[in-house]
Image (tube, rainbow, N blue to C red):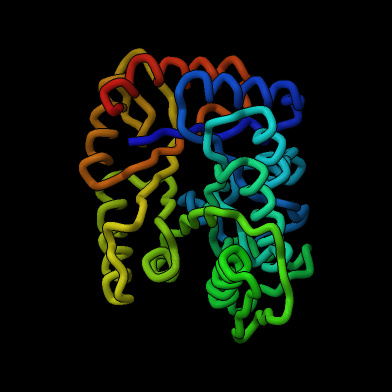
């Protein structure tokens, strides 16, 4: 089982030096990856779109929250690290033009020596897409085509794709990455699970307890089989908060004592999880985040090496 850490790119308190120090410390601790989340703008008015990872449906951060753009942040971190993979958790594809996106992500893959993992999804905030002037209708199909455009540009000398929304032909886009970035699909509704099974290189789940993850992963695998793909070729990853307590407590995975966290991870491992993205406290300072990750590296990770 591999482990990654969410970068501290959300909050005004973090300087460029803080972000570099955090990424380098995580790499030195032996973590396998660092990750950045994706939002570009936040509406200041009423948001009708429902945030899917809270029962209330309300996004937990206010609109004035400083939030560094994910690809730029990963490119910055790539230059300060040498080994860790660089992941998006997850990039909202309908916010972007697929050809330009392929160029930017392909460039990051080339310059980082093939360390990019593209976590990608269809998004949930219609108001954000409208602020960007990007269409929100048929966003699922647009996301599917976007993925196919990315792969065509990354793998074909003269890329060609003909879809309902996107078309490309008669151009070159060099340099192409020698290794196309793996695409791990986010989302937990049926459309996202289908996308992961049919088009993805894996499913990048978020905040699911083991029992919930298991049923959805079975659905992803079934979609893969129906598409003529080998389910064993897909990577299962999950993003979870990490808070280590000195005493057991009732909380979501992975919030609890060291023994509780180990038991949760054993269950995730049994289900086939290959990569766990740990989200430390993102707004409590560099030292607080690193303290949690260091303790995890020393007291938990050795059992899952």
Q: Is residue 37 left or right of residue 214?
A: right
- The relative height of residue 271 versus residue 172 in the rendered view (above or below) is above
Left or right for 236, reference 72: left
Q: Is residue 141 visible?
A: yes
Q: Quadrant of residue 46?
A: bottom right
Vertical arrangement, residue 173 with respect to residue 40, above or below = below
Question: Would you say 276 lies left or right of 266 here?
Answer: right
The residue under the point 65% across, 82% down is: 165
Nearest the camera: 183 or 158? 158
Residue appearing at x 21%, y 42% in the figure: 270
Residue 186 seen = no
Q: Position of residue 256 (x, y in %)?
A: 35, 24
* 102 w.r.t. 268: above or below: below
Quarter of the picture holding the N terminus: top left
**Residue 117 image position (x, y, % from top left):** 52, 48
Q: Nearer the viewer, residue 282 or 63?
A: 282
Q: Identify the residue at horizontal 41%, vertical 51% (top origin).
A: 205
In percent of width and height, residue 228 lies at 30, 75
């Amino acid at each position: 089982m591999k482990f990654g850490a969410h970068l501290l790119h959300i909050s005004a308190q973090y300087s460029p030096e803080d972000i570099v120090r955090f990424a380098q410390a995580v790499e030195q601790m032996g973590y396998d990856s660092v990750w950045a989340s994706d939002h570009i703008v936040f509406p200041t008015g009423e948001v009708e779109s429902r945030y899917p990872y809270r029962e209330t449906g309300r996004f937990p951060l206010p609109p004035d929250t400083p939030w560094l753009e994910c690809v730029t942040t990963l490119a910055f971190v790539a230059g300060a690290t040498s080994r860790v993979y660089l992941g998006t958790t997850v990039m909202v594809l309908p916010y972007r033009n697929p050809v330009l996106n392929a160029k930017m992500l392909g460039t990051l893959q080339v310059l980082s020596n093939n360390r990019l993992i593209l976590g990608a999804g269809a998004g949930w905030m219609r108001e954000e897409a409208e602020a960007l002037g990007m269409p929100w209708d048929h966003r699922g199909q647009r996301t599917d085509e976007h993925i196919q455009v990315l792969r065509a540009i990354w793998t074909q000398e003269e890329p060609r794709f003909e879809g309902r929304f996107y078309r490309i032909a008669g151009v070159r886009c060099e340099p192409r990455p020698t290794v196309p970035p793996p695409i791990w699909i986010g989302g937990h509704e049926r459309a996202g699970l289908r996308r992961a099974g049919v088009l993805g290189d894996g499913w990048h789940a978020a905040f699911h307890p083991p029992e919930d993850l298991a049923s959805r992963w079975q659905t992803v695998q079934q979609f893969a089989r129906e598409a003529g793909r080998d389910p064993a070729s897909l990577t299962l990853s999950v993003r979870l908060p990490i808070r280590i307590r000195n005493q057991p407590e009732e909380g979501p995975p992975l919030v609890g004592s060291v023994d509780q966290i180990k038991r949760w991870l054993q269950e995730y491992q049994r289900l086939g999880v290959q990569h766990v993205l740990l989200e430390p406290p993102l707004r409590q300072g560099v030292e607080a985040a690193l303290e949690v990750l260091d303790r995890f590296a020393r007291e938990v990770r050795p059992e899952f090496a």
